[in-house]
Every structure is written in structure tokens, then in C-alpha cells.
Image (cartoon, helix red, strand yellow):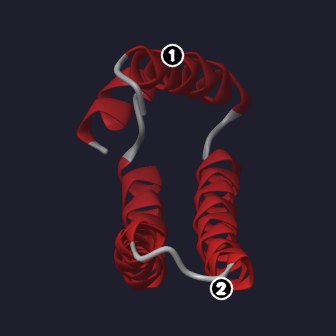
């Protein structure tokens, strides 16, 4: 958040709005992320036990649904962030976000 504040030169009102948005997103996304992590681990454990294919499919669908939910929450967060920014700030935001995503890909995320 600090880097975003500096990069797009947010005013105090924008900073407060983004903090509120981020706090709400974290409250909603944290339990989903924890469950996703646990269910991925459970799926990996399940695969080692040679279960029936339908059991694997069922659990894989659950993991996929949780990932979709988490991705959706992230997209909603971006929409909220963009709504707070002025047009000139949006351009900087997009440049910063694009660079961050490319760096994450290089690191395998």
C-alpha cells in the first residue's frame, strides 16, 4: 500500500478510502485463502492415497471454486482501487500493477 501511495501520489482522502477497501478485502479474502491452502494440501494428500477418480474430481472442483472466489475478490479489490483514483493516477497504477505481475511470474507465482 505504501508503494502505491508513493507511486500514484495519493491524497489523504484517497489513502483513507483505499485503506478501508483493503481492510474489507483482507477480511473477506483471508478465510478463503486459508481454506484454499488447506484444501490444496488435502488434495495433495488425497492423491497419495490412490482414491477413486470421482473423489479426486470432487475435491479438485472444490479447490478450483475456492481459487475462483479468491481471484474474484482480488478483481473486486482492483475495481475499488481504480474507482478511487483520478485518470492520471490510473495510468500509473496500471504500470505499477503490470510490472508487479511480471515480476511475480518470473519468480513462479
Q: Residues within 10 Å of mark 1 (few under 14, many from 20)?
A: few
In front here: 37 or 32? 37
Image quarter where the N terminus lies is top left
Q: Are marks 2 and 1 in contact (CB under 8 Å)?
A: no
**Mark seen at residue 68:** none
Residue at 62% x, 42% y is 85
Q: Earlier in the sequence, mark 2 or mark 1?
A: 2
Residue 14: percent from the left, percent from the top?
A: 47, 52
Mark 2 nearby-residue class (10 Å; few <14, some 14–19, many ≥20) = some
Which quarter of the figure has residue 11?
top left
- Rendering coords of residue 102 (x, y %): 51, 16
Name the residue tied to disc 1. 102
Mark 2 vs mark 1, foreground winner is 2
Note whether 49 is above or below 13 in the view shown: below
To which residue does mark 2 refer?
55
| Numbered label tally | 2
Above/below status of 69 relative to 86: below
- Give the residue displayed 65% in from the left and 71% down from the top: 60
- Disc 1 is placed on an element classified as helix
**Disc 2 to disc 1, C-alpha distance:** 35 Å
Please state the horizontal and vertical placement of residue 69, each as a whole percent of the image. 66, 73
Element carrying mark 2 = helix
Give 31 or 4, whichever is nearer the viewer. 31
Residue at 70% x, 84% y is 58
> x, y percentage for residue 106?
42, 14
Q: Nearer the viewer, residue 46 or 109?
A: 46
Decide: is 45 above or below 104: below
Q: Based on the displayed image, in which of its 4 quarters is residue 41 positioned?
A: bottom left
Amino acid at each position: 500500500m505504501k508503494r502505491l501511495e508513493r507511486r500514484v501520489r495519493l491524497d489523504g482522502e484517497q489513502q483513507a478510502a483505499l485503506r478501508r477497501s483493503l481492510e474489507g478485502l483482507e477480511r473477506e479474502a483471508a478465510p478463503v485463502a486459508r481454506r484454499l491452502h488447506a484444501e490444496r494440501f488435502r488434495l495433495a494428500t488425497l492423491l497419495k492415497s490412490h482414491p477413486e477418480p470421482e473423489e479426486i474430481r470432487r475435491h479438485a472442483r472444490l479447490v478450483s471454486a475456492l481459487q475462483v472466489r479468491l481471484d474474484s475478490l482480488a478483481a473486486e479489490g482492483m475495481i475499488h482501487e481504480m474507482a478511487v483514483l483520478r485518470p492520471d493516477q490510473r495510468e500509473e497504477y496500471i504500470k505499477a500493477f503490470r510490472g508487479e505481475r511480471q515480476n511475480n511470474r518470473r519468480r513462479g507465482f
